Amino acid sequence: MSHGPMAQGAVQSAEMILGQQEQVSILSITVDSTIQSALQEIKETITKYPDDQWVILTDILGGTPFNASYRFLEERPDIFIIAGFNLPILLETFMMAESSPEAIKEYIISHKESVISLVEYATPSEEEEEFDL
């Protein structure tokens, strides 16, 4: 779930790598969306598969997709919500589709370092020599 088409693009990219995925729903927040309309979309999506366990990936902590998902926890406290998803996390989630939500949760939480600052790797240390290319 994302602002605009980010979630759709991420799923399309993941499917280019892994192939078609089952049991995936994409929800996008638009300029006209409200927290209530987002809650309604989540409810409609989840009630299609009431017995399934759900992992909801959202784009921004504190954004409408996250806030609506968080509010939905009152009805379904078994749902696992992640804020700040990226393509590597989405790929791993798809590859772990047969795993329990708890296993997926543990994996995602343990790999929150999937965002790396290249400054740390690109800046030569005092011990390294600089070479002109």
Image (spheres, rainbow, N blue to C red):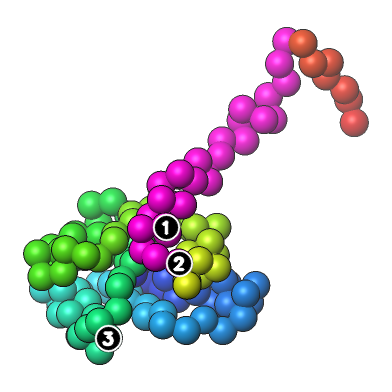
Judge whether residue 75 can be spotted in this image.
yes
Q: Amino acid at mark 2?
A: Ser
Dot in front, 3 or 1: 1
Tell me: 33 left or right of 129.
left
Distance (Cα) linking label 2 and label 3: 18 Å
Question: Residue at coordinates 49% horizontally, 46% vertically from top-left?
Answer: 111
In the rendered image, which quarter contains the N terminus? bottom left
Q: Nearer the viewer, mark 2 or mark 3?
A: 2
Mark 2 lies on residue:
99
- Is residue 127 left or right of 117 when viewed as pictured? right
Find numbered disc 2 in the image and state the secondary structure of the residue it sits on: loop
Quadrant into which the C terminus falls? top right
Viewer-closest of 44 and 4: 44
- Mark closest to the chain's N terminus, 3 or 1: 3
Judging depth in this view, the residue of 122 and 70 nearest the camera is 70
User: Does residue 79 lie above or below 130 as drawn?
Assistant: below
| Magenta highlight on residue 118 | yes
Is mark 3 in CB contact (under 8 Å) with mark 1? no
Q: Secondary structure at mark 3?
A: loop
* Residue carrying label 3: 49
Q: Which residue corresponds to mark 1?
A: 103
Name which residue lies at 50% across and 66% down: 96
Amino acid under disc 3 = Tyr
Magenta part of the protein: which range?
99-126
| Mark 1 Cα shell of 10 Å, populated few (<14), some (14-19), many (≥20) | some
